[in-house]
Image (tube, coloured by chain):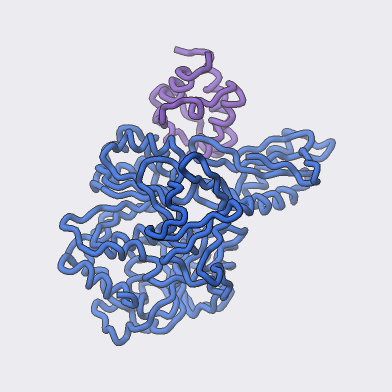
Chain colours: A purple, B blue
Amino acid sequence: MTTPIKDRISATFCEVFADQATGVTLPVLSENLVLLKSGLDSMGFAVLVIELEETLGYDPFSISEEAFYPRTFGEFVAFYEKHEPK
Amino acid sequence: MKNMSLNNLIITRVAPALDRVALIGNNQRISFQDLLGTCSGLQGKRVAVFVRNTIDLVRTLVALDGCAKTICPISTATDTKEIHHIIAKHPFDVVITDMSTRPLQPFSDLDIQIQNLHDVCFLDSFSESQNNQQSDWLVPTSGTTSMPKLVSHSISSLGASSLKMRKLTEQNKIWAQFYDLTRFAGYQVLLNSLLNGHTLVTLPAEISIHERVERCAEECVTHISATPSQWRKILMTGEDAKRIPLEQIVLGGEAVDQQILTALSNSYPKAKITHTYASTEAGLGIAVSDRLAGFPLSFIGNTDGSADISVRSGKLFLKAPSSASGYVDGKLFKDLEGWIDTGDLVEFVGDRFIITGRESGIINVGGDKVNPETVRQTLLEHPDVLQAIVFGRKNPITGMVLSAKIQIKANVDEMAAMTSIQKFIKESLPMKQRPRLLNFVDDIGVTLTGKMRSET
């Protein structure tokens, strides 16, 4: 299932991936894709979160009271959907 | 116990459990007994140690302590420029290594004798008469300026917190290695396990976080010391991380936020969680285990802890028994009363004080200290760059991401400039100093004082 947020996260992921993970093939962005096995390193994720804050206008990791570090792409998207400012 | 060699300290403190496993490598288990020994022909020498294999590295260090005049382990991950800088600071006689020719060029350039690890004559037994030297341990800082400094320690200052524990525990604890052992935080892990009869699971830097976590679970690791950035990665492995039977969690090397402390508390409710403030110069300065970010105000002026703490003009000063004697080039970093100006800025929040950054503007990126000015100067060398500012941008995954705003010259194609600058960065800067977030701006803001605006 695609949602507007998921589409925008996927698009940003692809852009950041192209910049940060040179020489690595872009993985299929499935729900079960393990983030730290995707080819993007933790610094790449940090860049992704910053870019998404510009694109979506919020950073769920900062606004959430939950201390959560997502494992999969599905969990990552769900965390953004859950904390979307109403 | 003050001037004992590592050999003697292990014998004294770990007996009668010398048959315990001291180190676990890939398909290798080494007992404390196996680690004991010395090496011939290196008495009184000034020795650099450039050994990749962790178990061989530890064996070499145990053999050298009390025998060599100075011991300077250098990480094999260090780039050539930094190696040059480090070894030029001290007149080394010999380097012991398991590396091949190319990375050894800096040593050859300075006519330092290269001795292959496999040609070093290790003796299983050692005679105290040959090992009565108090070896000076030279520890490179993580590069608070553009290049590392060499700090002069002894085993008693490096191992001050490890030596505090007096009694050998019946059950050995199992540590896992998340730091390079040649860094100050790495020595803490190594000496805590070696001097207290605990086992250390060695983990090569090149293996992925998932493999690391899996190895920790398989080996039933109970103790891990790592930076907050590394802990976030550990937690990103989800249920796998929860399989590690952790009893003690240590965080250090960079700012510890409440989120990571809460997340660790949730994942490991029974573990003791300690966050620390330490530096290569001051040693272990502050440690607290109350699961709250920052440090209690009551620590300031209190002399009961491991270090005396004072805040002067918004800066942290420490007087620590585990502090080093000085830099190897003789420069001092303590005042006459023994206080060390850490250069770290302090802010008071309620009944806590937190470290907010460095006075020098140095940015801590995942435990590595980066000088933004050095990076900026490099960016300015690119022919398309007119102006640049380099700054740390906060984020929840790594604490800080190194970022740059660049104003390119007029009439330069943006797309082509971006590709060219990205390539230039990869070629000119070591990994930890590369800005990961690049933005082109039309104008770099200039403040009224004429300085370029930086942001965090």
Q: Can residue B212 be spotted in the picture?
A: no
Question: In the displayed structure, does residue B251 sit left or right of residue B377?
Answer: left
| Quadrant including the N terminus of chain B | bottom left
Q: Relative to residue B112, is residue B391 depicted above or below? A: above
Residue drawn at the location 47% of the way across and 66% of the way down? B139
Q: Residue B212's spot in the image, x, y percent? A: 34, 45
Residue B78 in view (yes/no): yes
Residue visible at 74% across and 49% down in the picture: B380
Q: Quadrant of residue B456?
A: top right
Apparent side of residue B62 relative to residue A63 in the rendered image (left or right): left
- Asked whether, in this view, residue B147 is left or right of residue A26, the answer is right
User: Residue A69: x and y, percent?
Assistant: 41, 32
Kindly give the residue lying farthest to the bottom in the view shown: B129
Residue for point 46% across, 39% down: B257
Question: B445 and B26: which one is in front?
Answer: B445
In the rendered image, the vertical position of residue B365 relative to residue B117, given as above or below: above
Q: Determine the image quadrant of residue B108.
A: bottom right
User: Is residue A49 shown above or below B3?
Assistant: above
Along the viewing direction, whichever of B147 and B352 lies nearer the viewer = B352
> Which of the two residues, B353 or B29, is positioned nearer the viewer here?
B353
